[in-house]
Image: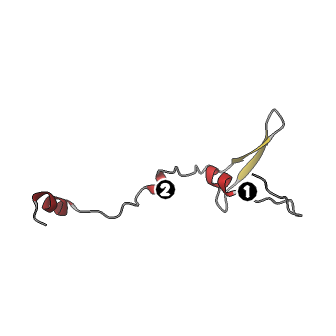
Amino acid sequence: MTSTVTAKGQVTIPKPVRDLLGIVPGSKVDFRRTDDGNVVIVRSDKKQPASRFAKLRGHAGKGLDTDAIMALTRGDA
């Protein structure tokens, strides 16, 4: 993935990288130099990105209450 540096020294972090690190507007990031001379980007705020499973939590709908389930199992519905 490649980004172009603007005249102001700004770059756009590619979407796959933002998604991987959970970077959203207002997130803080650090640029760190590794021992081999490369530079890596890491989140510097304490917020952990939501897991792909956490994003799905609560999306199944309201569901049935106990009385409705019992009526269905008894064949009352």
Residue 6 image point, x, y percent: 86, 62
Check the image and name the residue furthest to the top. Answer: 35
51 left or right of 44 in image: left
* Residue at the front extreme, as displayed: 1
Q: Residues within 10 Å of mark 2 (few under 14, many from 20)?
A: few
Give the residue pinned by disc 2. Answer: 55
Find numbered disc 2 in the image and state the secondary structure of the residue it sits on.
helix
Colour scheme of the picture: secondary structure
- Residue at image point 41% right, 61% down: 59
Depth check: give the residue in front, 24 or 14: 14
Q: Which residue is mark 1?
A: 13
State which quarter of the image contains the C terminus: bottom left
Q: Residue at x 49, y 56 (%)?
A: 55
| Residue at 10% in and 64% down | 76
Residue 7 in the figure: left or right of residue 26: right
Q: CA distance from mark 2 to mark 1?
A: 22 Å
Position in image of residue 2 (x %, y %):
78, 53
